[in-house]
Image (cartoon, rainbow, N blue to C red):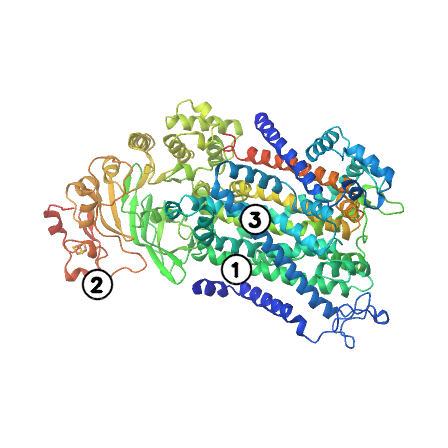
Amino acid sequence: MIQFLKLLFRNRLAALGAVTLSFTLLLAVLTPILPLPNPNITATADRFLPPFSDGHLLGTDHLGRDLFSRLMWGTRLSLAVGAAAALIAAFIGSTIGIVAGFMGGRTDNIIMRLVDMLMAFPYILLALAIVAALGPGLVNALFAVAAVNIPFFARNIRGVTVGLANKEFVDAARLSGMSNLQIILFEILPNVLPVIVIAMSTTVGWMILETAGLSFLGLGSQPPQADLGSMLGEARAALITSPHTSIVPGIMIFLIVMSINLLGDGVRDAIDPRLKSGALSRPLPATIVERDTTPPAPSDDLLALQDLRTEFHVGDRTYKAVGGVSLKVNKGECLGIIGESGSGKSVTALSVMGLVASPPGKIVGGAVSFQGNDLVGASYDQLRELRGDRVAYIFQDPLSTLHPLYKVGDQLIEAMQAHRKMPEKEARARAVELLEAVRIPNAARRVDNYPHEMSGGMRQRVSIAMALANEPDVIIADEPTTALDVTVQAQILTLLDELRRERDLAIVFITHDFGVVAQLCDRVAVMYAGRIVEEGPTAPILDDPQHPYTKKLMACVPELGGGKRELHAIPGLPPAVDRLPQGCAFAPRCEFAQEVCKQGEITLDANGDRAVRCLFPDKVSQTEVTS
Amino acid sequence: MAAYILKRLISAIPVLFGITLIVFLIMAMIPGDPATAILGAYATPENVAKINKDLGLDAPLFQRYFIWLGNMLTGDFGRSYSLNRPVLDEILERFNATLILAGTSFVLCALFGILAGVISAARQYGWADKAITFTVLIGISIPSFFLGMVMILVFAVRLRWFPVSGMYAIYGGGDLPDLLNHLVMPAIALAAVATGVVARMSRSAMLEVLRQDYIRTARAKGVNERKVVLGHALKSAMVTIIPVLGIQAGFVLSGAVYIEMVFQWPGIGRMLVDAILKRDILLVQGGVVFVAACYVLFNIIVDVAQSLLDPRIKS
Ligand code: SF4
């Protein structure tokens, strides 16, 4: 609660709303004891006095009544009526909702049908009908506004109650012989109450406005009694000649509603945890680049990452997701990047084309050299031209990575047309060709499917077809088979391998599965805590892993292409990349760890065409792994 | 598609009946002799006898309902005593004016609300976003009737850009430019709150969508950013925005009552308020049922639009 309030008041606008509202409430409460003139005393001689007249701070109205005094009393009345309407609506609506939700079955069905019908009315029509039946008057208007808001409470509270009605503590209460009424009062109600309060706080502003509105129409408070709405309604006749009589109550309503809105927004933001983490910020079209060092000179390789560093800045924390990674891949070659989730392998892959979500992501150092050009320093337009054209991606879960509302054919066509002008017909023919190339049966018909009409394996084939659309030089595949089941996974891997050989593609394959690496990759890089810990040709590494982490990773893969498994088998967790330990990041989980491992930087030492970041690689390579 | 529309139309039938029943029951709350109450000031003995016969008011409650319903189904909404003409004629004439006003406001709120929301999301935390967020906050906090009055003061009285009130000029008006000239202020005043709400919802819907994986896919394909935002993202966001538009249509229709009062617009809202003050119950009853039915039908259009956008709905 205290934390909630802190959060709430850190939001300056919400605090402003709270202060304004409290001040208004205070004035409303104090009105009867303030030294105000009687709001209903008319003085025809003093009609329409302007503001700041003698004895009348805000002037007078069309009957010479003191406007300030009327404003105070009117505010008091409006607030009271709005609050009363909210209470009545909350009470009746919640009762209905609890009964419906608790009883379930038929009762629930009938009640909710009725509620739905009430909600089919534009709200004011219902209110007008009620006032028409009961006759104009403030109390009737209050009932009308309350009645109109009952369905809102009924529906919300029913939803919560349904969730509670099947909980164990309710069953327990029933077994202990409590009656339904007792259960509702002592078990359900305390749990529902907070929801009711929140629902009230979000609607009370509306109800103040609605009752004021009915009074404005002349259907609410009747003279001489006046709330803010009827003050405004009466003043309307003199709008042009004496605008202050309208503006004064109008601004008051505005202030009340605005302060309630500000406060309500603040409450909502403070409750919604997604906003707290700042996760609701949108990613920019390309990752922000703020390099603190001069980038290395471009390399001759087709694609090379050079000491690449990518960080996430969340609040005052810095997560070093990629901490200086160097890799390269050439034509026809397949490079595997392997590691647990959180090892930075995906972020490494996304950094290549500036696709790391940013904010909070940021590339802070190193370079990505593609055909001799540095992509990290490239402009957005240059990046966009290369994306999908020369370097294409395949992502993990095709259900979330394909657009659900476009036909797969159109998504393929768009991939092509993003890079070259192509008549619609030709593009469509090419799309069918692509689907055939990834072995989708009935391709000519399938182009018109939506993603949800396909199986997981078919969708992933579509993603691959999309990656192939512009005959790229490099394909970066980020766990493309993890979401699929074993047989489909094997098919997709075979397909990728064939395509690579046919088209001389360079593939960067991100995975957590050594089986996949063995099947597909020429070389492999093992990542841990944002850095490469071992790298080299696949076969020798599989035969003789020299880093303890590599060894453990391999030990948790019992068979080739084992499918949907996460790496649970390694004891301990990878370190959080916002506070990496000194020395070797793997030390806390390493069975070979010595004191020296925890001191100073451990370098990635090359040895022939392999490299390993460990002080005791020989010891590791000689020991049978225990896992 | 046709099957879906038919299904929605059929499902609307019980709702329409429910609406008539609810209105009927509310009217049954009128204390005392119904005929006298319905007639109010017009309760001469002949009129009382006539309405008792017309509506079968001596009959039991449920029978009365079916008589009233049956009459309505044949287009007989009864006769307005205060206006001395058939209720339906008056409703149709007034509803036309309301439709022009509320329809314009609805288009305005959809157009500018979505536009503002998209700009706001695409430039999150930029100055445009801040300006829009601030304007929206003001917009949704001003009661529409007060906004209307302020607009009259500023744009009609001070600046003399637009006429103070009415739908057509009394002398020499009546053509389209004249109508538009009268329409500008009430339409904007009525649209303000709804525009703010739509802008807010659009902004958060866009922010939500822009974080989705398929947006990253579109970017990875090299689709240019304008297409990513206005094509991929907006299309998905519309799935969230369209139902909001449906709800806002109800609020626009409701707000029209106030705006019609402020601007002396001869619409159905003003008709209802006048009818209530004159206790012309049949006119109120007919008007409420008519507008509510239109709103239900409008919501079917909204649902159909939604299903056209999202292929996952039909299955
Ligand atoms: S450096 Fe030490 S702690 Fe780190 S992996 Fe090698 S042996 Fe283990």
Q: Chain of mark 2?
A: A
Quadrant of picture, ligand 1 = bottom left
Q: Chain of mark 3?
A: A
Is residue B144 in view from this perspective? no
Please name the residue that numbered disc 2 is placed on.
Answer: A600
Along the polypeptide, which appears first: circle 2 or circle 1? 1
At mark 3, the secondary structure is helix
What amino acid is labelled 1 in the image?
Gly
| Residue at (65% x, 42% y) in the render | A121
At mark 2, the secondary structure is loop
Find residue A330 and report its horizontal and vertical position in percent: 30, 41
Please name the residue that numbered disc 3 is placed on.
Answer: A93
A41 and A309: which is toward the camera: A41
Along the polypeptide, which appears first: circle 3 or circle 2? 3
For the residues labelled 2 and 1, say whether their Cβ atoms are less than 8 Å apart: no
> Are the residues flagged by discs 2 and 1 from a single subunit?
yes
Please name the residue that numbered disc 1 is placed on.
Answer: A266
